Image: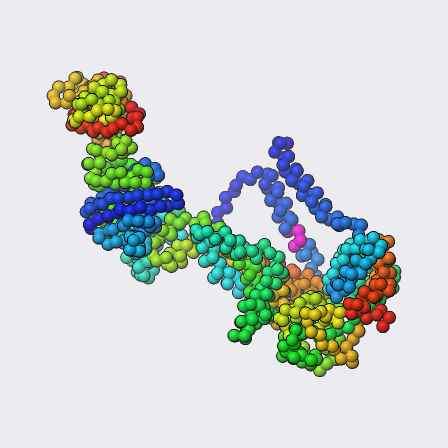
Amino acid sequence: MTLRMKPIVSICLGIAALLFNLSCSASSDSLRVLAASSLTEAFEEIANEFENKTGNKVTLSFAGSSSLAVQIEDGAPVDVVALADEETFERVKQSGRLTQHDETIFATNYLAIITPIGNPASIMEISDFDGNKIALCQEQVPCGRLTREITSSLPIEIQPATWEPNVRSVRTKVELGEVDAGIVYVTDVTSRVEAIPIRESENIRTRYPIAIVDNAKPSAMEFVDFVLSTTGQGILNRFGFGKAQQ
Amino acid sequence: MTGIKLSGKTRIGSEKFKYSFETGDHKRIAIIGPNGSGKTTLLRLIAGHECLLSGSLKIDETIYDEPVSKTFVSPHLRELVLQHQGGSVFPHLTVEDNVAFPYRAKGYSKRKARLLASETLKDFSLWKLKEKYPKQLSGGQNSRVALARSLTRQPTLLMLDEPTSALDVGSVNQIHEILQSLNTTLMLVSHDPVEVLKLSDYVIALENNKVIQFGDLASVTHQPASPWLSKFFDLNLISGVASGLEFKSDSGELLELPHHHSGNVQISFPSSAVSLHLSPPTGSPRNKWKTTIAGLDRNDNLVKIKLSGSFQCHAIITLASFQEMEIALGSPVWASVKATELNVLPNTIPAKT
Amino acid sequence: MRTKQLPAPYSLLAIGTLGFVLLAIPFIGLAQRTPWSSFVQIAKEETVLRSISLSMIIATSSAIICIILGIPLGWILARAKFRGLKIIRAVILLPMVLPPVAGGTALLFALGRKGFIGAKLNSWFGITLPFTTAGAIIAATFVALPFFVLTIESSAIELDSKLEEASLNLGATPVRTFFTVTLPMLRSSILAGIALSWARALGEFGATITFAGDNPEQTRTLPLQLFVALETNPERAMVIGMLMVVISLSVLVTLRGNWLGRR
């Protein structure tokens, strides 16, 4: 009887060990930062500089801000969160996982229209969207909310061909030429698309908050300070973000 | 029907096959041979499931398969039926629909096909079973279904691969009766010598994927071309040395040969050629030897007797003769066989006598 | 249908039970947290109803395409005997191994507006596939077809070719043989394949959102609806999740229960 049970017992132990291993987070000594998709390149460089300067390792994770909010609400292990609008920040505050710091605004951004290279549908402004294939951010992500704010004041009704879950997906669809235009942050513009500025009078500026989550590592404070420092702000400016004070 | 003329080679995987024979106007052909000798492949070749690589296959002067002229008639266009071992009755159709299948294949509606099949169903005593599915029937009943179905195709040639190999004696006899009453040309693969003797008048013998002998039943049984064939028709095989007309068996017994031979030989003679006597026989048989009855096997009106002594052999006599002689196991008898009945083969394989 | 009671060794029963529990627990959790009071109200919302109908149309259309393409493919894979077969088989099964998003991306590059086939479709016929229901059907079929083919292939291999040969001998043309002998023999695996591919198509997310995008009128299937709801309104998400479970269960049970029970 015992002999026959041996393989079963060892298999069960193996499975248990595997499950246990997976539930423990990997490399638990690096700083975990969740950031909005639009911050991808900027924060990658910031994290690099931070690691070089202080020797602290940083693990970055990017997604649409509302996805990040869900992750935090669900108890994901994180030290610092950087979001793309204040409304999402309010939601995260309600989860009760932030320490008692007021929100710190570290950057600002505003929207732009992008089209595939060559602007095949000759889009010059938002009212030209009518009759063409458009990609917009889903309304629960900051970019989508902002777009909604802008377009609601316009007389036309936009019917996008697709609502993408984050701002980068919108950009990809435009890059690939699958749609004639999309609305993304000005900081998302690359050489692979053409950018058409939205009139100052129609455009709205959005503010990016950053905060430390409860039970964060001591280096979290250092990281936030670094983002707000001249070096950090310089990097953000280079990528097109507006200054925090505006 | 002018018969089947096959002369050609083919290859399946890494095995090579070479066939060459004619059947003339014979209507009852048996294909025999040890396991793996190419019997099934032969049937499949004639049916069109395998094709020749060289040579040609003609049935009644129509070329069915000839690589060199790129002729090949598809299986469904050949007016013959190959009934696989086991019958291959369709499990998802009732008995009635199975038997009606060839009519449906011709294009008849379901109703018409069933109507046309009803005669056959009655002939084969399947009418009461027509709503049943094959898995509800016995082996014997399924064999009848397979046969009935094959016949509704009205083939000019019906090929059967061991049709009775898994059946009980009653079913075997039933099938044999049906087969004997048929008008179609029959080509039968069989492992049972009695079946071959009962049903066929022409034999094609295979060994090692080649035809080693073909001809009338009589000629093949009396002059088998190989030890296996010899054994198949239950002939007796004795090995020894021949010098001139004299044969000396390995065990020392002397026999007279019909022709001059020399060297190591095997002689064979049918069990039916052996006569038994209670006292040393006189008369023309010059080959006689003393023996003891070592075994008895009764089959219908015949008794097969195993004789032991200087060499082992079998004799077959009628039941009446057996009873008249009042012999039993252990009785001493004299056995004799005419020299003219002896067949001499050069010795290739030592006989197991 | 008569069920045979096999005496199973206890260790097998124990492991089997564990496996079943592992699968059942998430659904029990979902059912427990679903706000049943608002279930009907949310389910009746126009957007949800539209998603339900889209999902059903797309999944069913995919299943039908899978049947038409998958049966011949599966049968050929089982019976063919030529050299390149292993590679062809691997390509057919590729969508099963790839993450659906990768599949969707590949579809985009081939059939998108600028894709090497999609561009021609657009310029010759004015047809674009992304962001349309047709595109969603293609995405779902792409991921579901390998499952169907695999199911058919494994059954066709076991099929006794003697039956097909017998049919030919009895005068049935190869086409008739396929429909009257081969297909009926494959029936139970065809049904299993339908169930499998329909279910897979219904739950498809990654390839759909990448290739067909999220278009409320044409491509917002239940999984996509669920994804959006998860970030905005968890209650809604649970209701939609439960809806999917209910729909799937009823279809799967009907498919496998009714049609296999006979004989």
Residue A165 figure quarter: bottom right
Q: Is residue B169 above or below residue B57?
A: above
Q: Is residue B125 visible?
A: no
Is C151 contained in the magenta span? Answer: no
Q: Where does the N terminus of chain A fall, quadrant-wise?
A: top right
Q: Is residue A187 above or below residue B347?
A: below
Q: Position of residue C133 (x, y in %)?
A: 57, 69
Which residue is situated farthest in the left direction here?
B283
Residue B166 figure quarter: top left
Q: Residue at x 86, y 57 (%)?
A: A222
Q: Position of residue C257 (x, y in %)?
A: 52, 54
Q: Residue at x 31, y 46 (%)?
A: B9
Q: Is residue B70 visible?
A: yes
Is C26 contained in the magenta span? Answer: yes
Q: Is residue B249 left or right of residue C118?
A: left
Viewer-closest of B258 and A145: B258
Q: Position of residue B341 (x, y in %)?
A: 18, 28
Which residue is situated farthest in the bottom direction here?
A155
| Count of numbered circles in the view | 0
Viewer-closest of B210 and B312: B210
Q: Residue at x 74, y 64 (%)?
A: A37
Residue A85 figure quarter: bottom right
Looking at the picture, the colour scheme in use is rainbow
Q: Where does the C terminus of chain A fall, quadrant-wise?
A: bottom right
Q: Is residue A128 above or below residue C188?
A: below
Q: Position of residue B142 (x, y in %)?
A: 34, 46
Tell me where the magenta segment starts and ends, as one range.
Answer: C24-28
Q: Main secondary structure of the magenta part?
A: helix
